[in-house]
Amino acid sequence: MPAQKAPPAGTKTAEPVLENFYTVSEAAIRLRLREPQDPSKKGEKFLRDGVNKLGWPCHRMAGQLLFSDSDLAFIAEQNRNRVDGRSRPRRTRRPRQNVQPAGV
């Protein structure tokens, strides 16, 4: 394997930036999948399944599943409703019309 060349002396390499990290519960609240006062685990299963089954970005540190701001932005973009000609608004029921029974 050939040796790697060092960058020229006059160039600067980008330094890593520390982002904010959120636990699964905090990420669910940040994405508005549940309310802060709600004690249920609503939204957390959605995030865990997305990581485990769909390969969404996340960080695993100290045995915890953590999400950065850029991870949450990617997840939000992946779940955005796209208008591509094939998708349509959800169907809604028509209001029932008052139909009089026959013979009344």
Image (cartoon, rainbow, N blue to C red):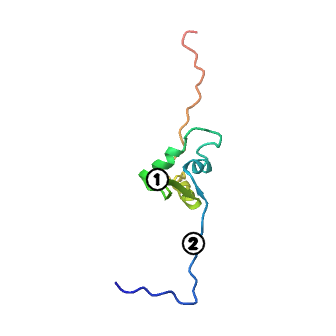
Q: Is residue 68 visible?
A: yes
Vertical side of 34 occupied by 62: above or below: below
Query: Would you say residue 58 is visible in this rendering?
Result: no
Residue highlighted by disc 2: 16
Identify the mark nearer the N-term, 1 or 2.
2
Q: In the orientation shown, which residue stands out farthest toward the right?
A: 37
User: Quadrant of the image for the N terminus?
Assistant: bottom left
Q: From this view, report whether residue 5 is shown above or below residue 41.
A: below
Residue type marked 1: Val
Amino acid type, callout 2: Pro
Q: CA distance from mark 1 to mark 2?
A: 24 Å
Instruction: Say which quadrant the C terminus sits in.
Output: top right
Regarding mark 2 in the picture, which secondary structure is present there?
loop
Expressed as whole percent of the image width and height from the top left, the position of residue 28 reads 57, 48
Please name the residue shown 53% across and 89% down the image: 8
- Residue 76 vertical placement versus 39 (above, below): below
- Is residue 39 toward the left or the right of residue 64 in the image? right
Kindly indicate whether the residue at mark 2 contacts the one at mark 1 (C-beta within 8 angstroms). Answer: no
- Residue 51: mark: 1
Q: Nearer the viewer, mark 1 or mark 2?
A: 2
Residue neighbourhood size for the residue with mark 1, other residues' Cα within 10 Å, grouped as few (<14), some (14–19), many (≥20): some
Q: Name the spot of residue 46 as percent of width and height, x first.
A: 50, 46
Percent across and percent down for residue 45 are: 49, 44
